[in-house]
Amino acid sequence: MLGETLIRPIRPGDIEACGQVLFRSFRHVAEKHGFPPELPSPGYALRVTAACAMHPDTVGVVAELNGQIVGSGFIDRRDQVYGIGPVSVDVELQDSGIGRRLMEALLDKSHRASGVRLVQDAFNARSLSLYASLGLAVKQPLAQMSGRPRSRPASEVKVRSMTKRDIKACADLYLRIHGVKRTNETRDALRMRSAFVLVRQGRIRAYTTGLAYWGHGVAETVSDMQDLILAAESYMMDPLNFIVPLRQAALFRWCLDQGLRLVKPMNLMAQGLYQEPDGCFFPSAIY
Amino acid sequence: MEAQSDTKPRPDAEIRIRPLVPRDLEACGRVQYEAFTQVSRRHRFPVPFPSARSAMRVIMAYYRQPNQLYLVAELDGRPVGACVVDREGMIRGVRSIAVDPEVQGLGVGRSLVAGVLELCRDAAGVRLTQDAFNLTSLSLYASLGFEVKEPLVKFEGRLKDRPRPGREVDRLGDRDFEACRDLCRRVHGIERDLELREGLRQGSAVGVFRDGRLTGYASAVSPGGYGMAETFEDLQQIIAFAHRRSWEPFSLLVPIRQAELHRWCLDQGLRAVKPMALMTHGFYQEPRGWHFVSGRY
């Protein structure tokens, strides 16, 4: 017999248990559908959980049942649009309504946001249905892609690390393409040293906070995005691993031509303010 | 089935694309069954054909239709791939593209789809639906110029509320053909006669009339048909009408960027069976109305 599930704010002492639940549940769903797990190890899941739990602008909630942590969820409130994720419920308790209660608790914390967004695995019919029934709409079919591109960066293209002085121009570019601001997240990326900008005729035409699962990017044109990806990749130790919107057919086809491998199908979902992007973009695993 | 290394075709083996002949039926039934079973099982989604024999019966049904062309890919003289393509229409639909799992990776699928595009070069476009979990087919079609336009979910079940259709909705007859064409032109910018004629002939075509004007129709409310309407309410009417005329569970391919329709299907207790995608090659117009798609497009 199940006891009463308590939904409450996360505490530092919950992080380890949350990491374990996150790792188990994500692996379970991915392996069930024949896709690689998003989090490669319990240690990695723990680091993700800790990073979310410790971030001053991210709010975390946990589900507790009979004194045990059985689920958690996070909402990133750094910018005008809030991003939800990761949300996880322990394997044996999926379908018990805990995911819905976690999501409702997170959505409750978004009253001041212009909108809420998230990215989910398209093969996960349960989460797709849950989020849709809570009012999030599918906006973009996506695919996670990884690998090393075949081409080398063009020598005439100027791509360099993002600096503090670029933040305003990057924020303006994001605003032009998506109609919302994402300044604080971009500023955070400076600390990770993963952010790059593409400069042409003295102006920033494209930027990325990181060509990684947690990074996003925007560009005025597809060819700017391609140049940015090739140049930024040449500075990276690890292969590319990022999320491509499939409706951006030219970018998607270019990624395939470059020999990048499809990892899994995903969806970007949104509630509230949403504008069809007026330019080239790729989302992070949050939005 | 275990692949035998000595029967494996050479990578340089010749691939030939040709129309199906009756003696291919058994081999093609097996290819369809094996290909879809393998990928669906790997990703734990329902298998579309219960047996090779049932796949063969579906192929026979297509083969008998004069407006469908069944193509076979032959590798060293052996049928190893197959698909069905519309012989007519402004936009041609392709279905059931399958390659024998034993020869995947040798370019059979690529030759087959390239053959379809060659065959349809006089059409304004070619479209298909694919299983979103099938990354091999997604990258194959994309690399041949197909573009993902709509994420879809295949829904199945019965409508919980058993909604009562209004008096504005009715079965369509031949006299409604032109009004349907006009609406399709407005919503999708194309003419789509093939399935509409099928729907009118089979009695599955349904329409909504407001002030004597057709504001929505479906060639059939099933993956065998497509539907469109000016408003969400009109599309609901069409689905409700078809639902009321049958006791069977029905299924529908829903473009889920239409959030209200997606949520309505969930609220009605329909089950999400699998994620899919609509892909197009050539002409495409963003729909100016509400719609659901057929297995073709």
Image (cartoon, grey):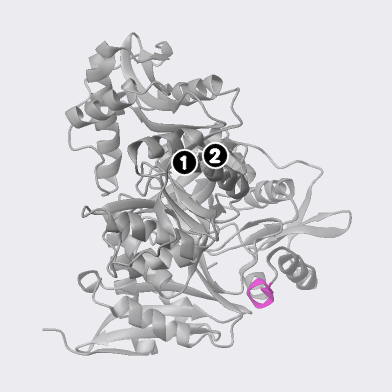
Name the spot of residue B273 as percent of width and height, x first. 30, 54
Q: Which quarter of the rendering shows the C terminus of chain A?
A: bottom right
Closer to the camera in the image, B181 or A179:
B181
Q: What residue type is labelled 1?
A: Tyr
Disc 1 residue crowd, few under 14, some 14–19, many 20+, Cα 10 Å: many
Q: Would residue B1 be visible to someone looking at this image?
A: no
The residue sitting at 48% across, 77% down in the picture is A51
Q: What residue type is labelled 2?
A: Thr
Q: Residue B297 carries which label?
A: 1
Q: Is residue A116 above or below residue B103?
A: below
Q: Which contiguous range is marked in magenta?
A: A180-186
Name the spot of residue A210 as percent of width and height, x first. 61, 61
Name the spot of residue A163 as percent of width and height, x first. 75, 68
Q: Mark 2 points at which residue?
A: B280
Closer to the camera in the image, B129 or A17:
B129
The residue sitting at 80% across, 60% down in the picture is A204
Q: Quadrant of residue B264?
A: bottom left
The residue sitting at 28% across, 43% down in the picture is B40
Sequence-wise first label, 2 or 1: 2
User: Quick check: is A45 in the magenta stretch?
Assistant: no
Name the spot of residue B225 as percent of width and height, x first. 40, 43
Check disc 1 and report its element: helix, strand or loop: loop
Give the left or right position of residue A228, taking residue B142 as reference: right
The answer to the question of whether label 2 and label 1 lie on touching residues, with beta carbons closer than 8 A, is yes
User: Quick check: is A183 in the magenta stretch?
Assistant: yes
The residue sitting at 62% across, 48% down in the picture is B186
Q: Would residue B247 be visible to someone looking at this image?
A: yes
Q: Residue furthest right?
A: A201
Closer to the camera in the image, B198 or B285:
B198
